Image: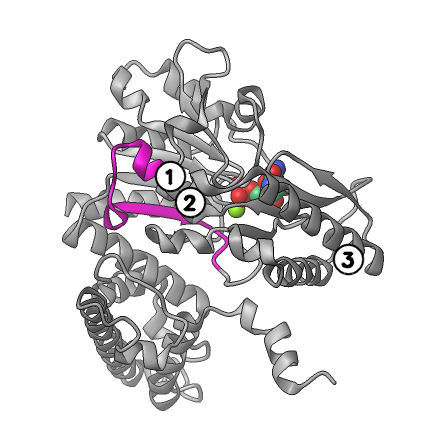
Amino acid sequence: MTTRYRVEYALKTHRRDQLIEWIKGLLAVPFVLHSQPTAVYQEHREGLQTVAADTYQRYAEIMRDVEKLIVDHIAHHDRDAPGKSKLKLLVPSVGTFFTRLYLEDAFKYQDEQRFISRRRFVAPSFNDIRLILNSAQLLGLVRSSQVQLVTFDGDVTLYDDGACLTPDNPVIARILRLLEQDRKVGIVTAAGYTDAPKYYERLHGLLDAVHDSTILSATQKQGLVVMGGESNFLFRFDQSSSDRLAYVPRDEWLLEEMQDWRESDITELLDLAESALRACAANLHLPAAVLRKDRAVGVYPVNGTRIHREQLEETVLAVQNTVQRSAVGTRLPFCAFNGGNDVFVDIGDKSWGVRACQRYFGGIDPSKTLHVGDQFLSAGANDFKARLASTTAWIASPTETVELLDELEHAVDG
Ligand code: IMP
Ligand code: MG
């Protein structure tokens, strides 16, 4: 029998971020108590201003209280008592924070951008809170730590889904600026190709700009790497190559734990994932073909069709469930995710990809690393795992990535 719990889980949990939902719930209370949906603008303009100020005050206070709970949560973690914090009690799925989050200041900043406290009909939303958290993280990096490495997801984060990073993309100037400031940059993407030309095709706008730059020093140019297949193929920038990239052999960058990943396990896991994907594709009549790669297996649509969101999600959850419950699934990390119009299972995940970049650049701390991505839901999303290795920002489009990088620049300038 399908229990209520399973229905709720299958339909909702993987599509919700518990911390964001919880904060949303807290802000809903002053919204309900203070908003004046029935007031008429012209007649009550002054009254409305007082109400807006009141609401602003309450929202700011709540964000300050959450900020304190996060400080306490970090302190518990530092005292080796993670899981005992009050925040963990309130939001059981909450993970580790590598820096403080300046939520009150971030709220004030975002309120200036989005006028959240002026709204009388629409309560603080998921996107309001996601953006407040991003701002709070940037402030945390700048005030309590520093940014030494920024890693970016590819699709949806740097360019539209399935598109390429072309020379007209405004993110290029921002990435060059990061390199100029002696920060390191990694593109940590699921796109898994074993050779440089394929990455050059996807990223040529950026790679050519770095190549042509007369401002960047040779060392600064070496601050750019591409990690493909989540954590499987590393390429460094190469000024002398026509593809602008050089493959870095695995023995130069693999983390110790990754050296224990056995080839036989990799094959076994991919075989299992492939059969689960095939079964799912047949069951759901997906207009899709199966693609088996060196370190991944996926289904993608044929003949320019689109796979429904529900079919994609069902496929991810089904294959994840199958692999997770297998013996090999407990020995080897993997990542099953919904790529927007395809489903892939990769060996490893972005936590390994980000950690490998940190190590490649000489051991950069998680508190000095920022991963920017669009996929942060707990299941079927591949940027989520980066939270284990670094601070993160959750963006919803390439435009938001550009805005985030400009906001970081302003925060650095103080
Ligand atoms: P990302 O957003 O940069 O992580 O890229 C995800 C997309 O890369 C997927 O949706 C796929 O369309 C594509 N892709 C190409 N090769 C692979 C692979 O080997 N594994 C996973 N995704 C791949
Ligand atoms: Mg993406």
Residue position for label 3: 280
> CA–CA distance between discs 3 and 2?
28 Å
Marked residue nearer the N-terminal end (1 or 2): 1
Q: Residue at x 36, y 63 (%)?
A: 114
Camera sees residue 400 = no
Which SS class for mark 3?
Answer: helix
Looking at the picture, tell me which residue is in the foreground, 118 or 48. Answer: 118
Residue position for label 2: 352
Residue 40 against residue 373 in the figure, above or below: below
> What label does residue 255 carry, if any?
1
Mark whose residue sits in front, 1 or 3:
1
Snapshot quadrant of residue 62? bottom left
For the magenta stretch, what is the residue range? 356-376
Q: Position of residue 180 (x, y in %)?
A: 25, 27
Tag 1–tag 2 contact (CB < 8 Å):
yes
Q: Is mark 3 within 8 Å of ligand 1?
A: no
Task: Say which amino acid is labelled 2.
Answer: Trp
Looking at the picture, tell me which residue is in the foreground, 410 or 376. Answer: 376
Task: Say which amino acid is labelled 1.
Answer: Leu
Q: Position of residue 1 (x, y in %)?
A: 74, 85
Q: Specify few, some or many for label 2: CA neighbours under 10 Å numbering under 14, 14-19, or 20 or more.
A: many
Camera sees residue 326 = yes
> CA–CA distance between discs 1 and 2?
8 Å
Task: Say which amino acid is labelled 3.
Answer: Cys
Q: Specify few, some or many for label 3: CA neighbours under 10 Å numbering under 14, 14-19, or 20 or more.
A: many
> CA–CA distance between discs 1 and 3?
34 Å
Residue 208 against residue 58 in the figure, above or below: above
Marked residue nearer the N-terminal end (1 or 3): 1
- In the visual, does 405 lie left or right of 54? right
